[in-house]
Image: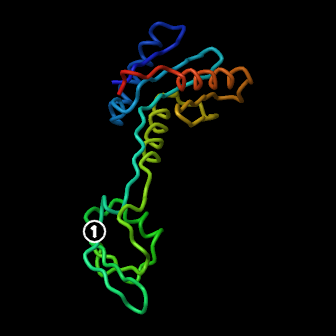
């Protein structure tokens, strides 16, 4: 489970936010993918900063992960490939990258595009970032509709019900820098 740090002036508020963070991490199955979560609650202002330092989880999905070439033939100077789909999850991303001549069934695609089974089709990091953003939405109190999010090695978001002051944004960026420069040895 991720290390959780909550800064809140109110002791019971700190306990509640810690529990909300733990529950949201468990619900989204993110606990093992995140090294550290830091939450700064400035309830009197009000604004909130939530920072996440994920483990490196980038994985590129390649054609070979969900399809195989079952037939290959030359026709009119082009190579025609018949693909057998073994997992439909990433087919929409494949269809954006190739020219489909025919699709006899949802498990077969015939194309005259050059097919390399090691061709990158989809980056799973997008799904991970979407999950982290869902996590953040679950942690922030309702009414905090104005948000800025900074995504790099760490993901930090600041939320308020009013426009941010420059020093608040600076505090969020400092948290991002702190998370990104943490010694993460031993967390993998």
For the point 25% across and 64% down, which residue is it? 86
Image coordinates of residue 112 in percent, x first then y, are: 41, 81
Asked whether 119 or 27 is in front, the reply is: 119
Element class at badge 1: strand
Q: Is residue 159 left or right of residue 28?
A: right
The image quadrant where one finds the N terminus is top left
Asked whether 154 or 24 is in front, the reply is: 154
Q: Is residue 39 left or right of residue 174?
A: left
Image coordinates of residue 68 in percent, x first then y, are: 28, 68
In the current view of this chain or complex, which residue is farthest to the bottom? 76
Query: Disc 1 designates what residue?
Result: 68
Image coordinates of residue 35 in percent, x first then y, are: 41, 25
Classify 75 as above or below 1: below
For the point 43% across and 89% down, which residue is it? 77
Image coordinates of residue 60 in percent, x first then y, are: 41, 51
Which image quadrant is residue 109 in? bottom left
Asked whether 74 or 50 is in front, the reply is: 74
Count of numbered circles on the image: 1
Which image quadrant is residue 119 in? bottom left
Classify 106 as above or below 140: below
Q: Is residue 168 left or right of residue 133?
A: right
For the point 41% across and 48% down, which residue is it? 124
In the current view of this chain or complex, which residue is farthest to the right? 166
The image quadrant where one finds the C terminus is top left
**Colour scheme employed for the rendering of this structure:** rainbow
How many residues crowd mark 1 within 10 Å: few (<14), some (14–19), many (20+)? some
Classify 141 as above or below 108: above
For the point 48% across and 28% down, which residue is it? 52
């Amino acid at each position: 489970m991720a290390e959780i740090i909550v800064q809140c002036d109110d002791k019971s508020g700190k306990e509640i936010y810690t529990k909300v963070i733990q529950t949201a991490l468990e619900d989204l199955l993110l606990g093992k993918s995140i090294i550290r979560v830091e939450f700064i609650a400035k309830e009197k202002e009000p604004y909130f900063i939530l920072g996440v330092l994920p483990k490196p989880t980038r994985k590129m999905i390649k054609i070979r992960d969900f399809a195989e070439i079952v037939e290959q033939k030359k026709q009119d100077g082009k190579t025609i490939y018949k693909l057998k789909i073994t997992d439909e999850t990433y087919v929409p991303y494949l269809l954006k990258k190739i020219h489909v001549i025919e699709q006899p069934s949802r498990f077969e695609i015939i194309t005259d595009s050059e097919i390399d089974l090691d061709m990158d089709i989809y980056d799973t990091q997008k799904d991970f970032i979407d999950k982290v953003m869902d996590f953040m939405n679950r942690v922030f109190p309702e009414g905090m509709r104005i948000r800025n999010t900074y995504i790099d090695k760490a993901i930090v978001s600041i939320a308020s019900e009013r426009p941010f002051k420059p020093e608040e944004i600076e505090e969020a960026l400092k948290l991002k820098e702190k998370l990104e420069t943490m010694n993460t040895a031993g967390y993998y």
